[in-house]
Image (tube, grey):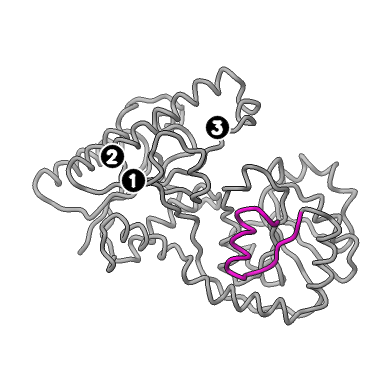
Amino acid sequence: MRQMIYHVPYPISESSRAASAIRPRAMRDAFIDAGYRVYEVSGDAARRRRRIRALMRRIALGETFDFCYSESSSLPTSLTESRHFPPHPFLDLVFLARLRRHGIPVGLFYRDIYWRDRAYVDSVGPVAAEGMRALYYWDLAWYRAGVDRLYLPSLAMGEVVPLVPRERHAALPPGLSPVDVATPDGNLHVFYVGGLGQHYRLDLLLAAVADVEGVELTVCVPSEQWQAHRDDLEPLLTPRVHVVHASGEELEELYARAHVCSLVVEPSAYRDFAVPLKLFEYLGHARPVLATASTLAGNMVEREDIGWTVTYDVEHLRETLTYLRDHPDERAAKSANARRVRASHTWQARAHQVARELTGSARA
């Protein structure tokens, strides 16, 4: 049986629905589904150290592994312990470099580059930002030496990732798990699930829905985020807008009511390379997507023909909602496209891509 090494510098949550927790769990399971015996190095630093020692003994005795796949944390690697105190600051980075010296190809998914944004300084303060940025650069310097392939949510993100040569970059966006949900009858129902805040403004969508009769909108956001923005958004609500705070299996009932899912967000430099996990969750449910034009998500919607894009303008959004309300056949056609293309975006497809690229085998 083929073997691979799966490494993350933190514990893998088996139940959390947060996007940062879903991906490590889903990729590990996808490698298992792809037929690999997975040697997992995860957990706190003490557990990872034990697992690394045991693994290196097996490698020294001649046991072979096809490749190693790792997922970084959104924190610097040396600060992933619960108390952010690094008992073994070189443990994980040296481990990846050692595997590469043993001839085991290493691929690492680099999660985010928000730390290079000017807004990062505002969020953590200038002194903390300077220290954290030094640690992020330290990680990338090790990746340059110890990683064969740096996987990114999109190649566009690579334009702002320093140190690691571009020729080693590869896109590895989120994956999906197909879920078959019947298309509902009735008036057009739009569904948004996600966050509220700087990168997730919903005022334009709420204003447009208020102006188009026969369109309903369900907004599913965390309760604490809704309370933080309630005073700004509540004046835009109508009886056709439903604000809920669901998660996990509760979301399936909301998807069952939806004809179209929304990623109408304000364009920004972040949106030029950000790949929302929710885009793939929408696609997994074969729901067509309404997205902002000239964002990376909007570009995918256009390329795959799985929905519609709008300029970030309330009038254009009103016109599009009116059109979708009056053309259920158009909605059905886009849903059929989503159902057709989603097989190429499963988590298993992502795992096969990694195996193929790191081993050079078309059969992986």
Q: Which residues are magenta?
A: 292-311
Q: Which mark is residue 248?
A: none
Disc 1, disc 2: CB below 8 Å? yes
Extreme top residue here? 127
Q: Which residue is mark 3?
A: 116
- Horizontal side of 157 relative to 239 (left or right) equals left
Q: Which residue is mark 2?
A: 96
Disc 3, disc 1: CB below 8 Å? no
Extreme left residue here? 61
- The amino acid beneath tag 1 is His
Confirm whether the magenta stretch covers residue 32: no
Q: What percent of the width, then of the height, locates residue 229? A: 79, 42
Identify the mark nearer the N-term, 1 or 2: 1
Identify the mark nearer the N-term, 3 or 2: 2
User: Secondary structure under badge 2?
Assistant: helix
Q: What percent of the width, then of the height, locates residue 147? A: 31, 42
Camera-near label (3 vs 1) is 3
Determine the CA span between mark 3 and mark 1: 25 Å
Q: Residues within 10 Å of mark 1 (few under 14, many from 20)?
A: many
Confirm whether the magenta stretch covers residue 300: yes
Residue at figure coordinates x 59%, y 53% from the top left: 276
Q: Which mark is residue 7?
A: 1
Identify the mark nearer the N-term, 3 or 1: 1
237 or 99: nearer the viewer: 99
Camera-near label (3 vs 2) is 3
Q: Is residue 208 above or below residue 20?
A: below
Residue at figure coordinates x 34%, y 36% from the top left: 144
